[in-house]
Structures are given as structure tokens and as C-alpha cells.
Image: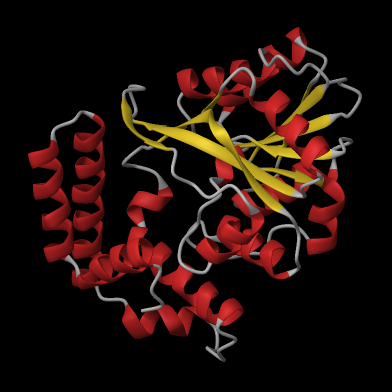
Amino acid sequence: MSEKELVSVVMAAYKEKNLYIRRAIESILNQTYRNFELIIVLDNPENKELEGIIWEYVEKDARVKFLINEKNMGAHETRNRAIRHSCGKYIAIMDADDMSLGDRLMLQVTAMEERNVDVISGFVEVMDENENLIYAMKNLPEKTEDINRKLRINDCMPHPALMVRKDVYQKLGGYNKVPYGCEDYEFLVRASLKGYKLYNVPKIILKYRMTMSSLSRNHLYQQYLMMRYCQRKYFDRKELGDYESFIKQYYTPKRAEKYSKAAGCFTEGVRAFSQKKYFRMAGMCLKAVVLSSDYRKKMFRYVFQLKL
């Protein structure tokens, strides 16, 4: 296919390790699809070391554009700012500590054009800090109707691999301010309810880095509650009040600790499965179910598609 359509890759940076952001940037610069711009926004103006690294790439490649926030704005508004400065027909999300595979943009643009879809993601591999494989997300739904059904239960379009038509992003009003890293899921829910065509490329297109120090790890239980809030508000049409009151209704430090431990056990169980250590897998998954009633409910909802 031709490469006439410009893709704007947007990256929000904050305090990523030097190696991580270099790998992230280079994974875009080495794409087989060449007609793109990479817009990086540094959300931490005090991080001079990271700023210096990004300037290196600006000087090397004219396709790299660099903005620095005057103050910390958060991931949602930082991405919104990057997209406001974009010129592409398509917007591709790129996190500053992940790695896109070389044919990611080509595969996604091809699917966008040939299938006439509006929002697209794809299969991803989850790796640890040292780039060791934890597990691969290869059982994601591909078609719009299957994705819409799954979104009512769980996020099934990995946001770090997302691509969206810019006009769709504009019609949706961009990312809303949603706490605990759930602005990504809330954006997809709104896209689903507006009737946009969704699709997952059935191929690994990105390596997602899971770090224990990330926001999603530190606030994992709150993130889960925020997803439940979005599901009940948008899909079930329930009047829930503000999200802070909703979270306070369920949150306790003990429940959060149990949920976090259960999530860690389940991740280890999935890793064991990928290594064909089936007894360990069963043991860790059973431990996850026993540790936290909230995580047990989440697993049952995911496996059996139940609205618990």
C-alpha cells in the first residue's frame, strides 16, 4: 500500500529510565512505515536529563517534534496537547517505556484503510523491566461486535498500541480527566457507545513494559474500582454520583492490599502458563482467587462474561 497518509505518533514522557525512552523512540524511528511524525511532550519540566535525551533525537530526525509542559499536567492532558499539535490523519499512541514492533504502523494503517475502522489496537507482549516475556495478549477479540461486548466486562484494546482517526478523537472530545490511569478505558467506552468501528490487529505489534513502580501497580485497586464506575455509569446507565464517593464506598487499605497481591499471583500464574509450568500456574491462579474477593469477581466476570 502507499504511505500517503501521515501518522502522528504521540508520546507523553515524565520520568522514564534513559534506556526505556531510547528504545521507545527508536522503535518508532525504525518503523517500516515511514510517513509519520513523532510528537513527544515532556510532562516534567524539571527532568533535564530526559529533556537532553529527547533533544538528541530532535537534532537527528526532522520527524521528531518536542514540547515541554510548563508544569505537570498528567497523562491525559499531555496526550491531548500532543494531539492538538499533530498534523496526521491517524493518531498512534506510544508510551515512553514500551517498544513498537517494526511493522506496527504499517499493519495498523493498512487495516484502517482496508477495513475502514475508526479505532484500532492489536496483540501485545507483556515484558518485565529487563524485557523478559511475562505473557502475550493474543486472545483479544478482533471484530467490533466482539470488542463492544468485551468492553462491558474488561479492557480488551491495549491502549499503548492504540491508533485512532484524528477526526474521531476530535468528535469524542479527546481524553477526559479520569483518575488512576482509567482515561484510556473511558475513552474506548465512549468510542464504543458512539458506534465507531473497532478492531484489533491479530498479530503482536507492541511490547508493553510492566514495572512494579508504575501508577497502575501502586493504585491497582483504585484503578479496578474506577473501571467498574465507568461500566456502571456508561453501560448500565446508573446514577452513581461523583467517582470519588464511589471509590470511598468500597475502598479500604486491606482490600487494596489483597487485590494487589492477588493480581501479582495471577500475573505469575500467566507467566508460568507461558513457560508450560502448569502446576505452578494452577497454584498461583488459585491463590489469586482465594486472596481477594474483588479479584475473584473480576476473574469470573472476565472468564464467564458475567455482570457481577
Query: As displayed, is residue 248 above or below residue 273?
Result: below
**Quadrant assignment for the N terminus:** top right
Visual colour scheme: secondary structure
Which residue is at the front of the view, 282 or 291? 282
In the image, taking residue 292 as reference, residue 37 lies left or right, namely right
Which residue is at the front of the view, 286 or 89? 286
> Which residue is at the far top?
60
User: What's the residue at 48%, 23% (across, down)?
Assistant: 20
**Quadrant assignment for the C terminus:** bottom left
Q: Position of residue 162 (x, y in %)?
A: 64, 42
Image quarter for residue 88?
Answer: top right
The number of discs equals 0
Q: Position of residue 135 (x, y in %)?
A: 33, 35
Image quarter for residue 258?
Answer: bottom left
Can residue 73 be seen here? The reply is no
Can residue 157 be seen here? The reply is yes
Which residue is at the front of the view, 117 or 21? 117
In the image, taking residue 196 as reference, residue 248 lies left or right, namely left
User: What's the residue at 19%, 35% (across, down)?
Assistant: 272
In the image, taking residue 289 as reference, residue 93 lies left or right, namely right
User: What's the residue at 18%, 49% (across, down)?
Assistant: 265
Q: Position of residue 226 (x, y in %)?
A: 46, 70
User: What's the residue at 41%, 77% (across, down)?
Assistant: 307
